[in-house]
Image: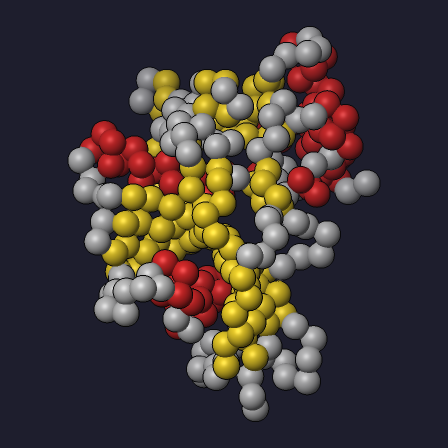
Amino acid sequence: MSKKSRLLDELVDFCINKNGENQDYYIFDNDLVKQLSIPLGFRNHNDATHIDSKAVCSPRMIEEGFSVVHLGATYSDGKRDTARHAFVRTDVFHEFEEIEKVTTISYRPGPLDELNTSESNILSLVYNQGIIHRVLYPYDLRANPSIYMAHRTRFQPNHKIGGNSLPTGETQAEVDMTIEYNGHVTVFEGKNWRASRNDFAIYQLYMPFRYYYLKTRDKGLELTDIDCCYVVRKKVKSKNSHDSDLEVYRYTFDDPDELTSIRLISSERFELRSNS
């Protein structure tokens, strides 16, 4: 068992021993994570609560039916307190659906398209190959959307998880890329394919969605609609090393206040095949 899994197991047992069994959720903070990580020799304690797939959950989390959610930090006397998290008995992961449509693209990579395999490069590839237009504006040949690159922002989401309103504080939203056209915003998350992982943590899409939703609802941001795209790139074994598949899943949230209300709009695989 990895040190991270051992640490998560100890966090589960600590919280249950402290607060009793069968609670809907258990709140803990980064100070406790650091305290328990030191005896285990797990140095990157900030990574302990970063769980982007159900495959990362520890054995005790699976036994208890726990997921980790981020509650953010509150302020006391003008100072930011330690960031908090919670174990919840709600599944906060979403399994990728079956691909509905497959499109093959004759791929002629530009000089920078294959320079690296970073997540930002995945989204650059999606834009450069015209895939964004195929997914978002298939019947508007004149569409000229604005593109906004990765950024991080802090805000207070005040959302629900499985119907429960948790005491959220200032939480960080990481936005990989945002596309806007005629007031319609789409937020993007890009990942490289990894074996044995067929799901993702919903918060990766929900937090950027929630950020823009609250800006529209409460701050007068003039948006007409908000949705999300999750892009997974998988390299294909072939005679040409540039070949890859880009699977694009487009989602929305039926209840903007509820993280688990995610719903698929469309899914399409773009098979990039080089002729050279």
Q: Position of residue 182 (x, y in %)?
A: 21, 53
Q: Is residue 247 above or below residue 168?
A: below
The quarter of the picture where residue 92 lies is: top right
**Residue occupying image coordinates x 24% and y 36%:** 216
> Could you tell me how many numbered marks the image carries?
0
**Residue occupying image coordinates x 51% and y 31%:** 260
Q: Position of residue 82 (x, y in %)?
A: 48, 26
Q: Is residue 147 above or below residue 228?
A: below
Q: Which of the pair 178/138 is nearer the observer?
A: 138
**Residue occupying image coordinates x 61% and y 30%:** 91
The quarter of the picture where residue 269 lies is: bottom right
- Does residue 175 show up? no
Give the side of residue 228 with respect to residue 244, left or right. Answer: left
Q: Position of residue 29 (x, y in %)?
A: 55, 24
Q: Position of residue 246 (x, y in %)?
A: 54, 65
**Residue occupying image coordinates x 51% and y 55%:** 267
- Does residue 216 show up? yes
The quarter of the picture where residue 245 lies is: bottom right
Give the side of residue 182 with respect to residue 47, left or right. Answer: left
Residue extending farthest bottom: 276
Which coloring applies here?
secondary structure
Residue extending farthest top: 20
